[in-house]
Amino acid sequence: MCRKTGKKVFASLLISTVLTCFVSEQLFAKSKNKGPELPKEEEGFYYGYGKASSAEEAEFMAKKELIENALTEELKTLKPRASRISVSDDSVNARLQNLKFSKNDKQGLDVTCKLKANKWAESEEAFRNSLRASLDASYETLKSGKSAAEKLDSAVSILNQLSVNGIYDLLSLHEGGDELYSKKVEGMCGTLVDELAFAISTPSGIVNSSTAFSVSVKDKNGKAVKGLSVKVSWDPASIPVAFDDADPVDGIIDIVKTDAEGNAEFSFPESDVLKGRPVTLTVSTAFSASKLATTAMRKFDARSSADENYIFITEDSEAYKTVLVEAGDFEAGAVDGDKKAGSKEAKHTVTLAAYEMSVSPVTNAQFAAFILATRGEEYPEFMSNPEYNKADQPVIGVSFDDANAYAAWLSEQTGDTYRLPTAEEWEKAARAGEQVIYPWGNDIPSKKKNANYNKNGKFKGPSPVGAFVEGNNAWGLKDMSGNVWEWTTSEFVTEGAETEEGVSSRVVKGGSWMDGPVELRISNFKTVETTEKSNEVGFRLVKEVKE
């Protein structure tokens, strides 16, 4: 069967002398923008069209499209709703050895190829017979192989060949027969796949260049499966966080073989684009290693696969960078000269042990990695909002308990102890050893665009962490004022005030993108119920100093 051709009707354009110059110019402009007309297609032929930067490339594209058109039409006679067939470039080159085309070259870079349907049928029959013969050895191994690995690798080889050649649902097991090669192979290896168990050695979490990875494969009896080809797939994690990538980031696939103990080692990809962002590692059988794998092949891989989630942090990354704050007395509260300070900000002296303050608040990317690693069921609700879900924006919509849970996880991952700061620890770090109203000094934030606050003229929501360089304090801490309020562990209850039973509040510091300059003062604070998940409250952490 060949594709039904559509008739194109060309009529000459009559331009009356009464048309205005404007109309004439518009018609001329439209005529210039039209691409070259495709030739009239004849019955009994297959066609393909190509356009590229070189005539050679355009010709190859035209021939590839013709082959895919012919295969797709054949499949649609059997399955009217079938998707368009794609074939690999190697498959095209293999078929071209016995195909002769009529070529129509337009302007050097627009190529049309056509081929008689009966010539296609003759050549394709020979191609399929040759391919079927080349699969015989793999098929025999699948039927009588000594190990599950041998059988499965043979099945993978067969199905991949059928897939990349575009005949997964077209090639019969025997010449002239009705049983499909692919269905026969699928039926033979389904049980084998279901008896496999994959396990990844490295649990979900934070990894780096020294982290070792391996996969273990065993059968239903716990026996090691040696010599099995395993697909190792690294993909950007499916999370509601937006990264500033110009183009979609592709996953990276590798194939490794298990040793005598059923294990295979591998490393995190060298690609920088996957570092610093949550990724999912999936190990499975290797049916869908090809980009042209079918749905059935992908389902085989999913049946016994295992996965873990990571975030790769380089040694020089600033993602979890901290600044040491020396031990000693500190005078918290309003500084002299701060005329906006209220009575709740009265001076008081506290003695603090040494600690390290995080340079930046926790970002969406960092918090999403935590949710992934712990298999959390929910992300903060604001992560689904494109105004708030950029990877480098501070995470918001987190309760006091959410922040503490993240700190506990990070502590487990790193071996250090992370926690929320007290209000006084927060203030001491924000002042960086100086008696100032704001982290950058005493000037209001509008003078040098020091912070993200209401009507800052640059952002209408949380800004990327560190976007206001002029707002960094003397120790390099970012966004200590503005952007988002930050949780602390401190409580504040006005003397004589009644507290509703069962309701707990904590002090938050720093002001936010929704507040004015007065709220951004270091000594200022407000209290927030611990269960609240606000779009203006985030957090940063303290790392305790080891003795």
Image: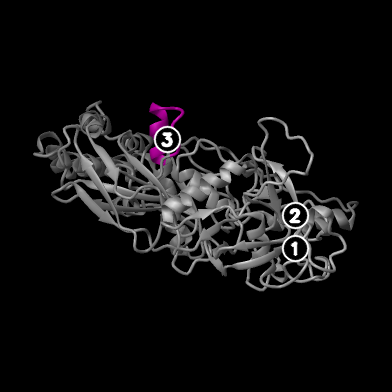
From the image, tell me which residue sits under label 1. 451
**Of callouts 1 and 3, the N-terminal one:** 3
Q: Which quarter of the rendered picture does the C terminus lie within?
A: bottom left
**Of callouts 2 and 1, the N-terminal one:** 1
The region drawn magenta spans: 70-84
Residue 73: numbered disc: 3
Looking at the image, residue 149 sits to the left or right of residue 359; the answer is left
**Of callouts 2 and 3, the N-terminal one:** 3
Q: Few, some or many C-alpha atoms within 10 Å of disc 2 (few <14, some 14-19, many ≥20)?
A: many
* Residue 112 in view in this figure: no
Relative to 224, say whether 111 is above or below.
below
* Residue 348 in view in this figure: yes
Q: Secondary structure at mark 1?
A: loop
Residue 209: numbered disc: none
Residue 433: say if magenta.
no
Looking at the image, residue 344 sits to the left or right of residue 210; the answer is right
From the image, tell me which residue sits under label 2. 511
Q: CA distance from mark 2 to mark 3?
A: 64 Å
Coordinates of residue 261 in the picture (x, y in percent): 15, 48
Q: Secondary structure at mark 2?
A: loop
- For the point 25% across and 53% down, the residue is 256
